[in-house]
Image: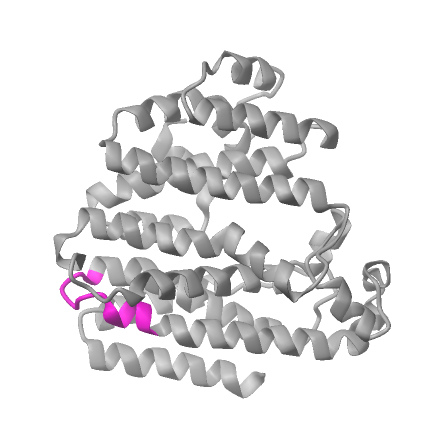
Amino acid sequence: MNSQQLLKATSRAFYLSLRVLPPGARQTMSLAYLLARCADSISDGQWLDAGEREATLRIFLECLNGASPDPWRARVAAVDPSQGGEAALLHHLPVALEELNVLPAADQRLIRDIVTTLSQGMLVDLERFPGAVLDAQELRRHLWAAAGCVGAFWTAVMRLHEPRLAQASPQLEELGTRLGNALQLTNVLRDISGDLREGRCYLPAQELQELGLNPEQLHDRAQEQRLQPLIRRWLAHGYEDFQASRDYMLLIPWNCWRLRLAALWPWCMGVATLIKISPGGWLSGSKIKVTRPWVYRMLLTTALLAPFTPLLRLYLNRQLSRLRKVL
């Protein structure tokens, strides 16, 4: 597979946002995504024993910062690249690093900084789990390290490649971070059961203890009623971050409609997913996601509205209203 094929195979919904970006920004964002996805495949993949993940992630970081890729090639030699996008991506890393080295210096710096930050967050997770995050502050640090920092990175790349954003509001970086935090919190609430099966509990242990619960008890779906106050509290936090980050799209100039869409689509899917999460079933183990017909309708509607700021604001407010009603 080449880089574009790998993007489609590994990025799922995010591929839509990458495709709509202008060419210069698309190249930088796409390469950053592939490198971050490779790091995630190390920290969370089944191709490595748990005890080897930290050392392998450190090899990855050394390669990212200029070391020879030979130790990496030796580490992935036993992985069959025909076994799907993740396996192919592991073997593709030396090629991706060559692509990184020919980018302009400013793009290289942004990519190395964000992939290093994300990888360091993964190292923290490897040390923390099996187990649970301790409190709300630690969960918020996870949200930032896993996705909030990506919002600020995204904004920096957009400013670098789109002159019309040079004078855009300085709030964009902060709002981009709020959007990243909201999307990661949505992932946390959607994937509670799956994370528990992997020995990870992102629901704060302190808040569970206040309800007389511990992570082990969350394997029992009968505990869902007792868990409800905690979930409702974090659903409300998610609403607050989505509400704040609504203005991220609106502050992007109307004639940069491609950039609006690239941020708008994850926002819309995140809000819709949070709506689907809110009724319950948090411990059921079932996969919660928006339907394909819904995605197609959303893509069409937002593509029509993106250049028209007042109409887009009305649309975003309507989505937030739907979310607020179910909290």
Q: Is residue 279 visible?
A: no
> Which residue: 46% across, 22% down?
63
> Which residue: 85% across, 64% down?
220
- What is the x, y in percent for residue 18? 33, 48
Quarter of the figure with the C terminus: bottom right
Please indicate whether residue 251 sits to the left or right of residue 116 in the image: left
Please indicate whether residue 318 sits to the left or right of residue 168 in the image: right
Which one is nearer the viewer's eye here, 2 or 37?
Answer: 37
Q: Which residues are magenta?
A: 247-257
Query: Looking at the picture, does residue 216 appear above or below residue 46?
Result: below
> In the figure, residue 250 lies in which quadrant?
bottom left
Quarter of the figure with the N terminus: top left
Coloration of the structure image: one colour
Which one is nearer the viewer's eye here, 1 or 154?
Answer: 154
Which one is nearer the viewer's eye here, 139 or 37?
Answer: 139
Residue 252 inside the magenta-drawn segment: yes
Please indicate whether residue 87 sits to the left or right of residue 252 in the image: right
- What is the x, y in percent for residue 131? 77, 51
> Which residue: 59% across, 42% down?
122
Query: Looking at the picture, does residue 19 appear above or below residue 232?
Result: above
Residue 320 inside the magenta-drawn segment: no
> In the figure, residue 98 lies in which quadrant?
top left
> Which residue: 53% across, 33% down?
86
Query: Looking at the picture, does residue 165 appear above or below residue 160?
Result: below
Q: Is residue 132 visible?
A: yes
Query: Looking at the picture, does residue 37 appear above or below residue 203?
Result: above
- What is the x, y in percent for residue 114? 42, 42
Total of numbered circles in the picture?
A: 0
